């Protein structure tokens, strides 16, 4: 676990999991409903400060989805979906006109779905950060495949890179996972 509370193993790539799915679904819902809100608003009113605010909100939402994708390579990107979740939640709780007012004027209920998308993104980012809901790497021939692990272990023992005790202990550990 590092200083930020993230469980990490040095040099280990982050695995895909349920949190990633929640972030992508939440981001998709957010983008869809902010875009719907913007299009419906522009259909009834001219481009004004509220439409400009919705356009900025749409860009931030799209940026959050991109950050969720980039978080597969570096977890520092997870802070942006967290920020999106906090921003939308604060805007709706504080009844900021940009979101709540526009939604009530042209698409009642859209603000609920935008909030739902933001909360899914935030919850997904939390799950990713805390390593909750990771999907197993059970791919035949992959690094978690027991046959491959046993072959590599035997190879290391044959080359005298590990002791017989280490070999037997690790072999039992791998066999216990079957």
Image: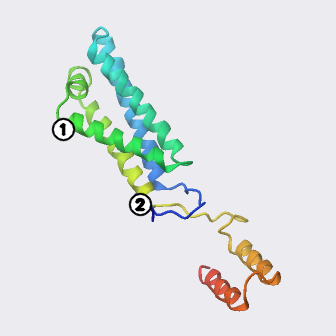
Residue with the most extreme bottom position: 165
User: Is 152 left, or right, of 58 in this rendering?
Assistant: right
| Quadrant containing the C terminus in the rendered view | bottom right
User: Is 155 left, or right, of 72 in this rendering?
Assistant: right
| SS for callout 2 | loop
Nearer the viewer's eye, disc 2 or disc 1?
2
Nearest to the observer: residue 64 or residue 25: 64
Q: Is residue 51 above or below residue 108?
A: above
Q: Is residue 88 above or below residue 9?
A: above
| Quadrant containing the N terminus in the rendered view | bottom left
Picture coordinates of residue 116, whole percent (x, y): 31, 42
Mark before the other along the chain sequence, 2 or 1: 2
Nearest to the observer: residue 167 or residue 101: 167
- The quarter of the picture where residue 85 lies is top left
Mark-to-mark CA distance, 2 and 1 = 31 Å
The residue at the point 68 percent across, 70 percent down is 145
Q: Residues within 10 Å of mark 2 (few under 14, many from 20)?
A: few
**To which residue does mark 2 refer?**
3
Residue with the most extreme right position: 159
């Amino acid at each position: 676990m590092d200083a930020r509370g993230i469980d990490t193993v040095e040099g280990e790539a982050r695995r895909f999991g349920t949190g990633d799915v929640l972030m992508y679904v939440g981001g998709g819902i957010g983008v869809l409903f902010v875009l719907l809100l913007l299009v419906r608003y522009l259909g009834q009113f001219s481009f004004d400060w509220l439409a400009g605010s919705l356009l900025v909100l749409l860009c931030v939402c799209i940026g959050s989805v991109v950050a969720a994708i980039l978080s597969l390579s570096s977890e520092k990107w997870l802070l942006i979906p967290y920020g999106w979740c906090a921003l939308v939640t604060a805007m709706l709780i504080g009844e900021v006109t940009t979101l709540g007012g526009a939604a009530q004027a042209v698409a009642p209920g859209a603000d609920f779905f935008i909030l739902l998308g933001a909360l899914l993104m935030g919850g997904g980012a939390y799950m990713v950060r805390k390593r909750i809901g990771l999907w197993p790497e059970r791919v035949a021939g992959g690094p978690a495949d027991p046959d491959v692990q046993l072959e590599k272990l035997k190879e290391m023992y044959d080359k005298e890179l590990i002791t017989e005790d280490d070999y037997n202990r690790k072999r039992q550990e791998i066999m216990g996972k079957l």
